[in-house]
Amino acid sequence: MPYRINGIGTWRYGKRNIHQYQGKCSHCMREGLLSSYDATLYFTFFFIPLIPLGRKRTFPPERKSIAGN
């Protein structure tokens, strides 16, 4: 899990290999278009990404409803 204190720690940057799929939102339990992507985890110093630590698959809670709600 990315974590920073006063700009020092780890954080995820970038969006690659975006994959969208139909599924059920785990938060509101509604059907919709869900997405996931690869993000690179970096060690940051004063909010500047310095050292890449690896790539992680991210499943954000963002959802685009089919009905537009």
Image (tube, rainbow, N blue to C red):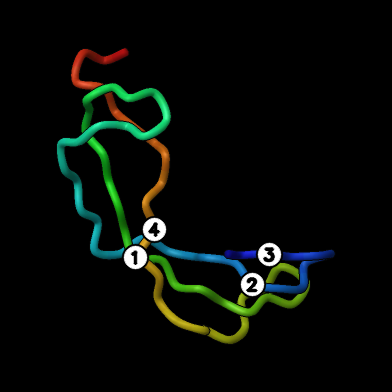
Crowd around label 1: few <14 · some 14–19 · many ≥20 (10 Å): some
Query: What amino acid does circle 2 point to?
Result: Thr
**Which of the marked residues, 2 or 1, is nearer the chain's N terminus?**
2
Query: What amino acid does circle 4 point to?
Result: Thr
Q: Which mark is residue 58?
A: 4
- Could you give the CA–CA distance between mark 2 and mark 1, rounded to whole angstroms? 16 Å
Q: Nearer the viewer, residue 50 or 22?
A: 22
Write down the residue under mark 2.
10
Residue 46 at x, y percent in the picture = 78, 72
Q: Of all residues shown, which one is farthest toward the right?
A: 6
Q: Are marks 1 and 3 in contact (CB under 8 Å)?
A: no
31 on left or right of 37:
left
Q: Are marks 3 and 2 in contact (CB under 8 Å)?
A: yes
- From what the image shows, is residue 21 above or below residue 44? above
- Could you give the CA–CA distance between mark 4 and mark 3, rounded to whole angstroms? 15 Å
- Could you give the CA–CA distance between mark 3 and mark 2, rounded to whole angstroms? 5 Å
**Which of the marked residues, 4 or 2, is nearer the chain's N terminus?**
2
Q: Nearer the viewer, residue 28 or 42?
A: 28
Residue 22 at x, y percent in the picture = 15, 36
**Which of the marked residues, 4 or 3, is nearer the chain's N terminus?**
3
Could you say whether the residue bearing mark 1 is in a helix, strand or loop?
strand
Residue drawn at (42%, 39%), measured in percent from left and top? 61
